[in-house]
Amino acid sequence: MKNDFLKELQKEAKAQKKLNEERIFPEFLDEVTSFIGEYSWQTLLLLSIASAILMELI
């Protein structure tokens, strides 16, 4: 059981390493992505209001 846990932990560590090494978004978007991460529901609310207004205008 302990051995299975260590194998699973190593597997997760490899996945985390890959996520830390490969960037999804370019570095210049770090401020935007961290803002979205920190204020996710506020960002979604703002985007939904903006899209609703845009749909009304079209």
Image (tube, rainbow, N blue to C red):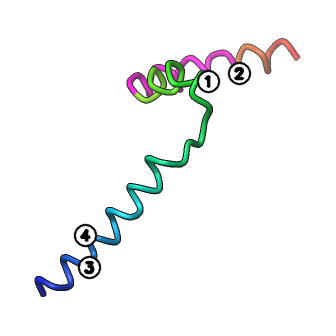
The residue shown at (44%, 28%) is 40
- Label 4 amino acid? Leu
Query: Which residue has dot 4 on it?
Result: 9
Q: Position of residue 26 (x, y in %)?
A: 62, 31
Query: Residue 27 in the image: x percent, y percent?
Result: 57, 27
Q: Looking at the picture, which amino acid does disc 1 mark?
A: Ser
| Distance between the alpha carbons at the discs numbered 3 and 2 | 46 Å
**Magenta segment includes 42:** yes
Q: List the residue tagged with mark 3.
A: 7
Label 2–label 1 contact, CB within 8 A: yes
Nearer to us: label 4 or label 1? 4
Q: How far across and down, in percent of the image, does residue 10 sit?
A: 29, 70
Q: Which residue is mark 1?
A: 48
Circles 4 and 3, Cβ within 8 Å, touching? The answer is yes
Going by the numbered disc 3, the residue's amino acid type is Lys
Mark 3 vs mark 2, foreground winner is 3
Decide: few, some or many residues near mark 1? Use Cα within 10 Å; few <14, some 14-19, many ≥20. Answer: few
Between 40 and 17, the one lying in front of the other is: 17
x and y percentages locating residue 44 in the rendered image = 53, 26
Secondary element under disc 4, as helix, strand or loop, is helix
Identified by mark 2, the residue type is Ser
Alpha-carbon distance for marks 2 and 1?
5 Å
Point out the stretch of residues depicted in magenta. Answer: 38-51
Q: Is residue 19 above or below residue 34?
A: below
Q: Helix or strand or loop: what does disc 1 sit on?
A: helix
Residue 51, disc: 2
Callout 4 environment at 10 Å: few (<14), some (14 to 19), or many (20+)?
Answer: few
Badge 3 local density, few (<14 within 10 Å), some, or many (20+)? few
Identify which residue is drawn at 33% across, 65% down: 12
